[in-house]
Image (cartoon, grey):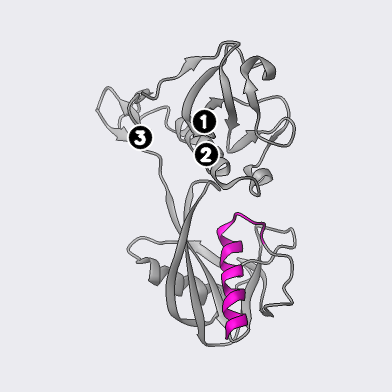
Amino acid sequence: MMMQQQVTDTERGWWIISDENRIWLPQGELPFGIAAQWSLQGKIALPIGEWQGEKVWLIRQKMNSHMVSLRHIVSSDRGLFQLAGRGIQLAEFYRSHQYCGYCGNKMHHSVSEWACLCNYCHERYYPQIAPCVIVGIRRDDQILLAQHQRHRDGIHTVLAGFVEVGETLEEAVAREVMEESNIKIRNLRYVASQPWPFPHSLMMAFLADYDSGEICHDPKELISADWYHYDQLPLIPPPNTIARRLIEDTIILCRNA
């Protein structure tokens, strides 16, 4: 049963306090321990999972300080990061689905699944997940890396984008690569997936080989894009990200080429 409850002094676990895609990190990391330790008594919490034998609680509220992006803990343990991502996405889902989009009446939360229900027209809403593709592209002993306009922190990463209506994943990869870099790829193969709560994506990762074309990056999406030798890479994404895995997998392929 997924039922909200009022927190007492003695509830214990990991605490995800989230509002508008932000998370409370009072000491730079996810709060853990007894509710009273963090002055959380009296707040309404929803259990959303377990981590290392301890409950994970979601509280939908904005705190006075230390509300930051989940990116601050992207390098933490993958399982805990994914649970924190679930919390942020559920908090935003419940915030944006207070009223039915069909009839306008107020909705309530299901106690058996992650859903919002309308008692008037009986419509049922689930959290929406946006499928994204991300691809590491190799040319001999080089990898294609780009700086994205939305990440002005010097990080160079692989190409990615959202899947459009009516596309297969393979078609989405080919289109995004062509739109962003002007090159064609071949030998596309699936690698892995990762929930990515920025704000509610599922990243599906691929590797591919260069086929043809000269790089001409899309300035609306990218600051730059270029080929980099596998042992002379710029700043790349942190560990525990699917982008980092693709880069590391491509480095292995380059070394073995």
The label shown at residue 53 is 1
Q: Residues within 10 Å of mark 3 (few under 14, many from 20)?
A: few
Q: Nearer the viewer, residue 36 or 113?
A: 36
Q: Element under label 2?
A: helix
Label 2, residues with CA under 10 Å away: few <14, some 14-19, many ≥20? many
For marks 1 and 3, give the CA distance: 38 Å
Residue 61 pos. (x, y %) = 59, 25
On whether residue 44 falls in the magenta region, the answer is: no
Quarter holding the N terminus is top left
Query: Which residues, given as a range, are shown in magenta?
Result: 237-257
Could you tell me if the residues under marks 2 and 1 are in contact, i.e. CB atoms within 8 Å?
A: no
Residue type at mark 3 is Gly
The outermost residue toward the left is 121
The correct choice, above or below, for 86 with respect to 152 in the image is: above
Kindly identify the residue that appears in the image at 72 percent across and 32 percent down: 66
List the single residue furthest toward the front.
Answer: 53
Asked if residue 217 can be seen in this view, the reply is: no
Q: Percent x, y for residue 41? A: 61, 12
First-in-chain label (2 vs 1): 1
Q: Main secondary structure of the magenta part?
A: helix
The residue pinned by badge 2 equals 83
Please, is residue 245 above or below residue 90 in the view? below
Residue toward you, 41 or 215? 41
Left or right of 51? Residue 39 is right
Closer to us: mark 1 or mark 3?
1
- Per the image, the residue denoted by label 3 is 101
**Mark closest to the chain's N terminus, 2 or 3:** 2
Cβ atoms at labels 1 and 3 below 8 Å apart: no
